Image (cartoon, rainbow, N blue to C red):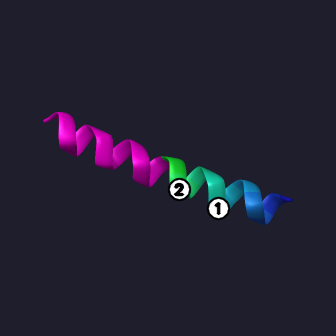
Amino acid sequence: VYYNLGNALRALGQLDAAVKRFEH
């Protein structure tokens, strides 16, 4: 469970960074 949660958090962080890079 914790492994999947960490994986999801990392994926969300990468997605957020990609969105910010796309916006700016």
**Residue in the image at 73% along x and 54% along y:** 5
Main SS category, magenta section: helix
Answer whether labels 2 and 1 touch (C-beta < 8 Å). yes
| Label 1 Cα crowd, 10 Å radius (few <14 / some 14-19 / many 20+) | few
Rendered image: mark on residue 22: none
Identified by mark 1, the residue type is Asn
Of all residues, the one furthest to the bottom in this rendering is 3
Q: Secondary structure at mark 1?
A: helix
What residue is disc 1 on? Answer: 7
User: Which residues are the magenta region?
Assistant: 13-24
Using the numbered discs, state the Cα–Cα distance from disc 2 to disc 1 in whole angstroms: 6 Å
- Residue at the spot 42% in from the left edge and 48% down from the top edge: 15
- Residue lying at the far top in this picture: please name it: 23
The residue that disc 2 covers is 11
Q: Position of residue 18 (x, y in %)?
A: 30, 49
Residue at 19% from the left image edge and 34% from the top image edge: 23
| In the image, residue 23 above or below residue 17 | above
Q: Quadrant of residue 21?
A: top left
Residue 4: x, y in percent? 75, 61
- Taking the image as shown, residue 24 lies to the left or right of residue 1, namely left
Instruction: Residue 8: give x, y in percent of width and height.
Output: 64, 54
At label 2, counting other C-alpha atoms closer than 10 Å, the crowd grade (few under 14, some 14-19, many 20 or more) is: few
Q: Is residue 12 magenta?
A: no
Figure disc tally: 2
Amino acid type, residue under disc 2 in the picture: Ala
Front-most of 6 and 19?
A: 19
Helix, strand or loop at mark 2: helix
